[in-house]
Image: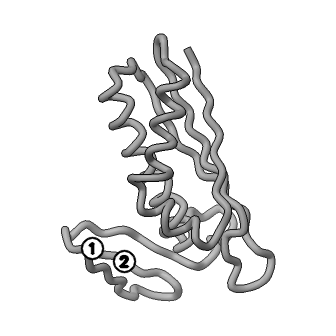
């Protein structure tokens, strides 16, 4: 895998990966009334973590024939107050909706993602405690 960022102006960059997909990045805080010009790098880490484990869990739940109608993964990350402002604690919240969802199937899917499949969790867990929470809506 290769990735690069190209400077646009100020603290704004465009990130590009092998596939040619691009992503706006910005480290500056937007002025009042303005929208952010892109993701901050630490936000991308959190989104990448959510996407990595989310893809695992939904794939496993589909294989277990769970009738999932909606699925969301939220990453709640606490950060150090001093620079370099690393993550100090992460809680991954899995929110599953559907009919007759088996809580044991969801727990097992999360466990497999966290212990076997998701490289983002495996890498970040070496630096920060990661916990999870599961919410099922019927």
Cα distance in 3D space between marks 2 and 1: 10 Å
Residue bearing mark 2: 14
Q: Nearer the viewer, residue 50 or 31?
A: 50
59 relative to 39 in the view: left or right: left
Residue lying at 38% horizontally and 45% vertically, measured from the top left: 56
In percent of width and height, residue 44 lies at 49, 66
Of tags 2 and 1, the one toward the viewer is 1
Q: Nearer the viewer, residue 75 or 89?
A: 89
Residue lying at 65% horizontally and 39% vertically, measured from the top left: 133
Mark 1 falls on what kind of element?
strand
Residue bearing mark 1: 17
119 relative to 135 in the view: left or right: left
Among the 4 quarters of the image, the one containing residue 6: bottom left
Residue lying at 42% horizontally and 39% vertically, measured from the top left: 57
Residue lying at 58% horizontally and 65% vertically, measured from the top left: 125
In percent of width and height, residue 104 lies at 53, 25
In percent of width and height, residue 32 lies at 69, 66
In percent of width and height, residue 47 lies at 49, 58
Judge whether 95 appears above or below 9 on screen.
Answer: above
Of the numbered discs in the image, which one, if any, rests on residue 38? none
Quarter containing the N terminus:
bottom left
Mark 2 falls on what kind of element?
strand
Mark 2 neighbour density, 10 Å: few (under 14) some (14–19) many (20 or more): some
């Amino acid at each position: 895998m290769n990735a690069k960022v190209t400077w646009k102006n100020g603290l704004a960059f465009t990130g590009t990966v092998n596939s040619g997909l691009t992503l706006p990045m910005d480290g500056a805080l937007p002025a009042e009334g303005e929208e952010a010009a892109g993701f901050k790098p630490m936000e991308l880490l959190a989104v990448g973590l959510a996407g990595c484990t989310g893809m695992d869990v939904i794939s496993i739940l589909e294989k277990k024939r769970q009738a999932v109608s909606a699925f969301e993964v939220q990453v709640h990350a606490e950060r150090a107050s001093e620079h370099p402002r690393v993550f100090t604690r992460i809680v991954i919240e899995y929110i599953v909706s559907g009919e007759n969802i088996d809580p044991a199937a969801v727990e097992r899917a999360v466990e497999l993602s966290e212990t076997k499949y998701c490289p983002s969790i495996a890498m970040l867990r070496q630096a920060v405690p990661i916990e999870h929470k599961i919410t099922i809506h019927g």
